[in-house]
Image (spheres, rainbow, N blue to C red):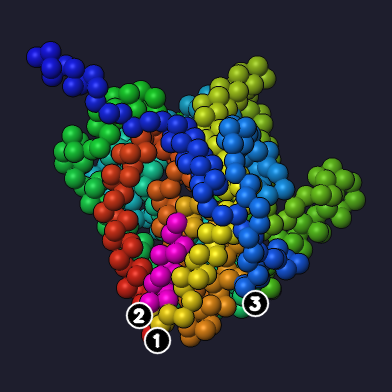
Amino acid sequence: MQETQAKKKHRFHMPTAFTILFLIIILIAILTWIIPAGTYETDKAGNIISGTYKTVANKPQGIWDIFMAPVIGMVGDKQTDGAISVSLFILVIGGFLGVINKTNALNEGIASIVRRYKGREKRLIPILMLLFALGGSTYGMGEETIAFYPLLIPVMMGVGFDSIVAVAIALVGSQVGCLASTVNPFATGVASQTLNISPGDGLVSRVILLIITITISILYVYHYASVIEKDPTKSLVYNQRAEDEKHFLVKASPNDDHKMTGRQKTVIWLFGITFVVMILGLIPWSNLNSHWTFFDKFTKWLVNIPFLGDLLGHDMAPLGTWYFNEITMLFLFMSVLIMAVYHMKESEFVDAFMAGMSDFLSVAIIVAVARGIQVVMNNGMITGTVLHWGELGLHGLSQTVFIILTYIFYIPMSFLIPSTSGLAAATMGIIGPMGHFAHVSGSLVITAYQAASGWVNLITPTSGVVMGALAIAHINVGIWWKWMLKLMIYLFIATCVFLGIAALL
C-alpha cells in the first residue's frame, strides 16, 4: 500500500508551458555554442540571396542572454520583432470579455445556443471549422482565434463535449487553413513576392489541398466528439471537467426558459459585430483584387467631410489595412460602447475590464516567452547556418524527392521560426530558385512551405497561438500532443502524397 502511494507521489507531471518554453530557450542557447555562426547577404527588401552564405564569428548566448530573451521577445530588437502588439491585443480582449461577462449576456447567449442545438450539437463542428479554415486560408488567422476560445469552450462543454473540442475547432480549423493557404498575405503573399510570381499561381492546387486537409480534420474532431458524447470518461481532460465547468461558467441548461433582456441582446449583437469588423479589417481586400477598393475610397471620403473627418480622426485606417494596433483599438472602443449601452457604472466597467485583463495576463506573457526562442536563435547567428544546411541538402534532387524533402526541411524550420511571413522572408529566396533547377514550380515550393508551417503550428510550443489557446483552455501541452498525434500523421501523409503527385503534373 505504501509503495503504491509512493509511486503516485512520484508520478511524472508535464511541466507548465512557461517551463517548456524556457527549457527550449536554454537548449537553443546551448546550440549557439555548438553550431557555427553564419549569415547571408540580403537584397533591399530584406530577402536572403542564394549562394551568399558565409561564416562569421561565433556569438554564443549565455545566462544573461537566456534571461533577456523573453524581455526582448516582448519589446523586440534589431534582429527580432517584439510581441508587445500581440500581448497588448490579448490583454485588451481579456478586458473586453470581462465587460461582456459583467453583463451576463454571454452566459444567456450560450444557454440559447445550447437549447437551439439540442440533439444537433455536432453540426456546429464542421460549420465552425470551415469558417476558421477560411480565415486561416485567406488572411492567416492565428492570434485572432484567441478571442474565440472563451466563447467556444463554454458552448462546447455546455452541449456535452470538452475543452479539447473547443480548442480544436478554432486552432485546428484556422491552422489547417494556414496549412493550405490560398491567398494568405502573410504566407502566400510574402513568399510569392520574394519569388516574383503572382499569389494566384497554384491557387487551384492549394484549394484542393485545403479541401483534403480540412475534411480529414473535421472527421477527426467529429469522431472524438462522438466518442466523448457517448462516454464522457473517454475525454482526455475528464478529470478536470468539474473544475473547468466552474471556471468557464457552464451553467446553460437546455430546459432553462430564462429569456435575455433587451440590453443583453444588444450586447450580444455588439459582440458579434466586433468580430465581423475585425475580420473585415484584416482581410487585405485590395491585395486580393486591385478593384476591391471600396473601403479605401469610403474611408477617404469619410475623413474628408468637414468637421466629421476631424471628429473621427484623419489617421483612421480603412478596413483591409488593419493589424494588431487597429484591432486592439476596436476591442477597446467596443468595450466602452457596451458599457454605455448597458448603462454600466464607470467603476463597475473599470473593475470588470481589469479583472478580464488579469485572466489573460499569463497568455500575454506566454506569447512573449515563445518569441524569446527566436531572439536567442537570431542573436546567436545560427539561423543562417541552419538555412545553409538545408540549401546544401536539397540541391540536385528529382521533382518528387525535392518537393517532399522541401516539405520535411520546412518542418524544423517552422519550429524555429513560427512566423509564416518571417519564415518566407528568411528562406524563400534560397529554396525557391533551387526548385527551378529541380523543375519544380515556385508556386508548389510555396505550397510545401505553407503546408509545413501550418502543420507545425498545430502543436509547436514556440507558437504563441498554440500556447495561448492551451493556457486559456487549461489544457496541458502533453495532453494536446497526445490528442493531436494521429491527426498529425494523417495530415503529414496526405500532404506528402499530394505534393508528390502535384510535382509530376
Q: Residues within 10 Å of mark 1 (few under 14, many from 20)?
A: few
* Labels 1 & 2 near each other (Cβ < 8 A): yes
| Vertical placement of residue 479 versus 176, above or below | above
* Labels 3 & 1 near each other (Cβ < 8 A): no
Q: Residue at x 28, y 61 (%)?
A: 490
Q: What element does badge 2 sit on?
A: helix
Q: What element does badge 3 sit on?
A: loop
Residue matched to label 2: 501
Q: Residue at x 62, y 50 (%)?
A: 58
Residue matched to label 3: 196
Residue 488: x, y in percent?
32, 56
Q: CA distance from mark 3 to mark 1?
A: 22 Å
Direction from residue 86 to residue 124 in the image, left or right: left
Give the magenta-colored segment's residue range.
Answer: 401-412
The answer to whether residue 62 of the structure is visible from this angle is yes
Label located before the other in sequence (3 or 1): 3
Q: CA distance from mark 1 to mark 2?
A: 7 Å
| Residue type indicated by callout 2 | Ile
Residue 355: x, y in percent?
56, 22
Residue 199: x, y in percent?
58, 73
In the rendered image, the quadrant that contains the N terminus is top left
| Vertical placement of residue 438 versus 424, above or below | below
| Residue type indicated by callout 1 | Leu
Closer to the camera, 186 or 249?
Answer: 186
Residue matched to label 1: 505
Direction from residue 285 to residue 394 in the image, left or right: left
**In the rendered structure, does residue 10 fall within the stretch colored magenta?**
no
| Residue type indicated by callout 3 | Asn
Which of the numbered marks, if any, corresponds to residue 395? Answer: none
